[in-house]
Amino acid sequence: MASTVPFVTLNNGQKMPMLGLGTWGSPPGEVAQAVKDAIDIGYRHIDCAHVYQNEHEVGEGVKAKIDEGVVKREDLFITSKLWNTFHRPDLVEGACRTTLKNLGLDYIDLYLIHWPMAYREGPELFPQDENGKTAFSDVDYVDTYKALEKLVELGLTKSIGISNCNSKQVERVLAAATIKPVTNQIECHPYLTQSKLSPFCTERGMIVTAYSPLGSPNRPWAKPGDAQLMEDPKIVALAEKYNKTPAQILIRYQIQRGHVVIPKSVTKSRIASNFEVFDFELTKDDVAQIDTFDCNGRLVPITSAAGHPYHPFENEEF
Ligand SMILES: NC(=O)C1=CN([C@@H]2O[C@H](COP(=O)(O)OP(=O)(O)OC[C@H]3O[C@@H](n4cnc5c(N)ncnc54)[C@H](OP(=O)(O)O)[C@@H]3O)[C@@H](O)[C@H]2O)C=CC1
Ligand SMILES: O=C1CO[C@H](CO)[C@@H](O)[C@@H]1O
């Protein structure tokens, strides 16, 4: 029998498992099996997105485990995200229904605005102008958020939230929200600890979901010679101290900060070992030491959207 994961209670009372399976870059032909393995191991939370272009296969994995009777739909917490080309309020419901169709579900548990920047509406996920630059749209993410609220009323998603929003953007959404965002899903790991944005969100009743917690070694723009978080001697030393793997230290670090964490893997042994993080505790001093590794080392800077008026990491306070 698989072990269970602790939950956080969201600001609407919904329970969210603190550990989930990431699916960005999980390839066709592998991701359905990864989802099935994860559910067998005990994962109950899957992080998806339309732009990952694999929701159909994620859904196959989920369906297989529901059909086998391993889990019921209500045991699972499935997140998806609205891509940047669907921010115009009249496109939001259709985009969510497409995701539901791909996943083979009647509802999702959480729907996020993936980024605050809107891109030109149309069939391409990464539209470009005549100069090869990302083509923007001027839709305000607050208007998009108001359209997400309607999805809750329609029963298409239980909760809604935001992703990649800086503190000013969080404030703007909160000021307009009738239904509060439950989370801000943001990059978080020892090289980018989010020491200001994390408490800023939690003080406002929003959970932080930490993405790229292992340092996203397979991000497509990684260059040879880039620092590898899991190979950092300071993390390796902590792993040796606790007789754990570097990945387990990095996942546990997030959990002890009260963050939800969504490491990605398509490797069964790693999916399993990444789950073995509830049988040990980092000392307060070790958490504080990891906090000092921050070097503003952002791994997902979305430079392709440079110059967008809503780019969250340009001229941000935090
Ligand atoms: N909201 C947003 O804008 C974003 C959200 N995300 C979400 O967060 C998830 C996680 O972030 P992501 O950037 O994918 O990166 P992670 O930090 O989770 O790293 C994933 C990589 O680490 C490898 N890995 C996993 N476990 C281990 C292990 N125990 N030992 C060694 N290597 C390991 C995986 O390899 P392998 O699969 O081959 O085992 C994969 O290459 C995403 O998949 C996505 O769901 C991510 C980025 C942006
Ligand atoms: O979640 C993410 C990973 O994939 C996207 C691009 O393909 C990123 O923009 C995004 O942050």
Image: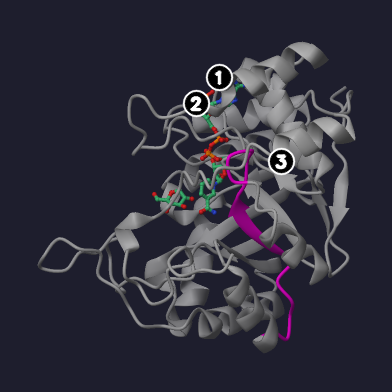
Above or below — where is 292 with respect to 144?
above
Q: Which residue is mark 1?
A: 231
Q: Is residue 285 magenta?
A: no
**What is the CA distance from the residue labelled 3 to the residue labelled 2?**
17 Å
Question: The disc labelled 2 sits on which kind of residue?
Answer: Gln
Expressed as whole percent of the image width and height from the top left, the position of residue 122 reads 28, 71
Check the image and report above or below for 311 versus 255.
Answer: below
On screen, 182 above or below 49? below
Q: In the rendered structure, which disc, 3 or 2, sits on the residue that comes first in sequence?
A: 2
Q: Secondary structure at mark 3?
A: helix
At mark 1, the secondary structure is: helix
State whether residue 105 appears in this view.
no
Q: Quadrant of the C terminus?
A: bottom right
Could you classify mark 1 by the number of other residues whose Cα lies within 10 Å: few (under 14), some (14-19), or many (20 or more)? Answer: few
| Amino acid type, mark 1 | Glu
Q: How many marks?
A: 3
Determine which quarter of the picture holds residue 255. Answer: top right
**Residue pointed to by mark 2:** 228
Q: Is residue 234 left or right of residue 31?
A: right
Q: CA distance from mark 1 to mark 2?
A: 5 Å
- Which quadrant of the view contains residue 108? bottom right
**Magenta stretch: dominant secondary structure:** loop
Label number found at residue 291:
3
Q: Position of residue 94 (x, y in %)?
A: 47, 72
Residue nearest the viewer, comparing 260 with 301: 301
Decide which of 315, 118 is in the foreground and name it. 315
Query: Which stretch is magenta?
Result: 177-192
Q: Residue 312 appears at what percent x and percent y?
A: 48, 67
